[in-house]
Amino acid sequence: MARDPVVTNPELYRVVMENDAVRVLEYRDSPGDRTQPHDHPDSVMVTLSSFRRRLVAGGESREVTFEPGAVRWLAAQEHSGENIGDSETHVVFVELKAPEHKPGAEAAPPPLGPTDGGG
């Protein structure tokens, strides 16, 4: 990723978990906080608090409002943002990684249900 948000704004983003398939980021900010331009791969965003933001990308800006518990798909994008509300932002991003192709490896059928060893 060219501009990793954990690098561009380490005071606001932190890696919660990472493996070969996903990276999970936690994002927290306060009213008035701004992010530097950064990139996100295809992701799922889970909002844990309500918030208002101004997002800026490609010379255009847009204001968005989210309520707690919203789950949204985010296509890969570059943007910067600003908390324009009066509450803190708390969000989790589940960033998807492209599956790694291994030559000669046969695809196994997906498991039915969770892979926790239970039946």
Image (cartoon, helix red, strand yellow):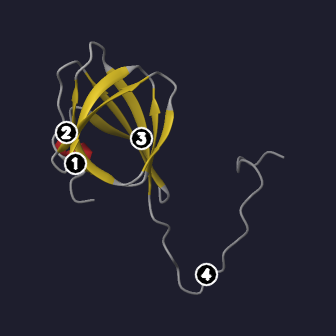
- Percent from the top left, x then y, of residue 88? 30, 18
- Say whether disc 4 or disc 1 marks the residue closer to the N-terminus: 1
Label 2 and label 1: CA atoms lie apart by 9 Å
Label 2 and label 3: CA atoms lie apart by 15 Å
Instruction: Identify which residue, 68 or 6, lies in the foreground.
Output: 68
**In the rendered structure, which amino acid carries the disc numbered 1?**
His
Q: Which mark is residue 93?
A: 3
Contact (CB < 8 A) between labels 4 and 2? no
Which image quarter: residue 28? top left
Q: Give the crowd class for mark 1: few <14, some 14-19, many >=20 residues within 10 Å.
A: many
Total number of numbered discs in the rendering: 4
- Say whether disc 4 or disc 2 marks the residue closer to the N-terminus: 2
Mark in front: 2 vs 1: 1
Contact (CB < 8 A) between labels 3 and 1? no
Label 4 and label 1: CA atoms lie apart by 35 Å
The residue indicated by pointer 2 is 9
- Percent from the top left, x then y, of residue 114? 71, 47
Whether residue 68 sits left or right of residue 56 in the image: it is right
Element assignment for label 3: strand
**In the rendered structure, which amino acid carries the disc numbered 3?**
Phe
- Say whether disc 3 or disc 1 marks the residue closer to the N-terminus: 1
Mark in front: 4 vs 1: 1
Instruction: Identify which residue, 117 or 100, lies in the foreground.
Output: 100
- Say whether disc 2 or disc 1 marks the residue closer to the N-terminus: 2
Label 3 and label 4: CA atoms lie apart by 30 Å
The residue indicated by pointer 1 is 38
- Percent from the top left, x then y, of residue 65? 37, 25
Element assignment for label 1: strand
